[in-house]
Image (spheres, rainbow, N blue to C red):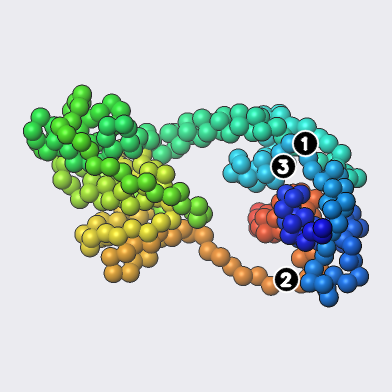
Amino acid sequence: MYYSIDQVANELGKTKRQVQYLVQQRLAEPINIDTHRRDGGYRFSEEELKRLREVFQLPGVSVKDAARQLEMTPQYLMKFVKEEQIKSDVAMIGNRKRRWFQQEEINRFKNFLSQKSHAKREGEYGRKVQLISREVHIFDEVLVNGSMARVVSVEPLQVLTDNGEFIRVNSIDGKTRNLPERRYIRKRGVVEFRMPIPRHYQHPVYQLLFQLLHQLGERNIQIYEEEFGDYLVRCRLGVVHLSEREIQLLQRSIISGDVQIDNQTVMFQSDEVQKTLYISKQLLKQYESIAYQEEISADEKLLEALHHYIAKS
């Protein structure tokens, strides 16, 4: 049985380009080195795949995979390694040293960063608003003692009544509306809005926030109460359908990012743009070689070099 370069890359946890680099450096030996173009790609024997596993597979999680789990660049992760905030080990893989992490240590450090990030966001944005509890979700219209009110806090349960009072209650009359389950939006970036905290339970701001929460889902929106009485709303790059009045309010409230409007459909967009760049094959090979050694993508290395150049100029 023979294996394609894609199968070998998958088995080793590497990219196709990285395996091609191993072949170019004679660190991997396909059976058809001279005829691979005619054959439609490299082919590797089962014995060679076994040898590559023994040589290149780490006993734990690589720097690249650990960085991906922690949602940071490998360079930033290495900063924490040097500061001894996360433990790691080094193994000889092939003819060079490779750093690796135990999964338990990654989980511990991820929890540590989450707690630290939460505290930082609290200081930067204000008090984070809890969006749901077992009984209710934020900004829903509910009945309390026979009168309509707006949920403005889920723990403790607090409502804004029809006469403008913020009061704590033990329960609501009946059931709150279910919050639909939405997928986490992985597209990079957020759009931010700032809105005043209203004093009337039927204020359009509450209805807009209710719509954003329902249509985006709790995993794609964060809401903070700022020091001077505003809501700071951070939305991932999803799509919502709003009324004309809600769209106008949204446009007046935006502070970062952008919105694209088509009829009553609103698409959230970040300030980041994609740029196509043409470079020579030789320069690309140099970047890929450096990126491979640092266990990052060539795109990440190129962006890092650009930031470094601008910072120095």
| Image height of 71 relative to 123, above or below | below
| Image height of 121 relative to 53, above or below | above
Label 1, residues with CA under 10 Å away: few <14, some 14-19, many ≥20: few
The residues tagged by marks 2 and 3 sit, at their Cα atoms, a distance apart of 28 Å
Question: Could one spot residue 256 in this view of the protein?
Answer: no
Question: Could one spot residue 134 in this view of the protein?
Answer: yes
Q: Nearer the viewer, mark 2 or mark 3?
A: 3
Q: Which residue is mark 1?
A: 59
The percent position of residue 138, horizontal first and vertical second, equals 28, 38
Is the C-beta separation of discs 3 and 1 under 8 Å? no
Q: Which residue is mark 2?
A: 279
Q: Secondary structure at mark 1?
A: loop
Q: Residue sitting at 23 percent across and 46 percent down?
A: 206
| Image height of 16 relative to 133, above or below | below
- Name the N-terminal-most of marks 2 and 3: 3
The percent position of residue 104, horizontal first and vertical second, equals 65, 29
Q: Amino acid at mark 1?
A: Pro
Front-lying residue, 29 or 130? 29
Q: Residue sitting at 74 percent across and 50 percent down?
A: 11
Q: Amino acid at mark 2?
A: Ile
Q: Secondary structure at mark 2?
A: loop
| 257 displayed left or right of 90 | left
- Name the N-terminal-most of marks 1 and 2: 1
Q: Amino acid at mark 3?
A: Val
Which circle marks residue 63 in the picture?
3
Front-lying residue, 158 or 192? 158
The percent position of residue 79, horizontal first and vertical second, equals 69, 38
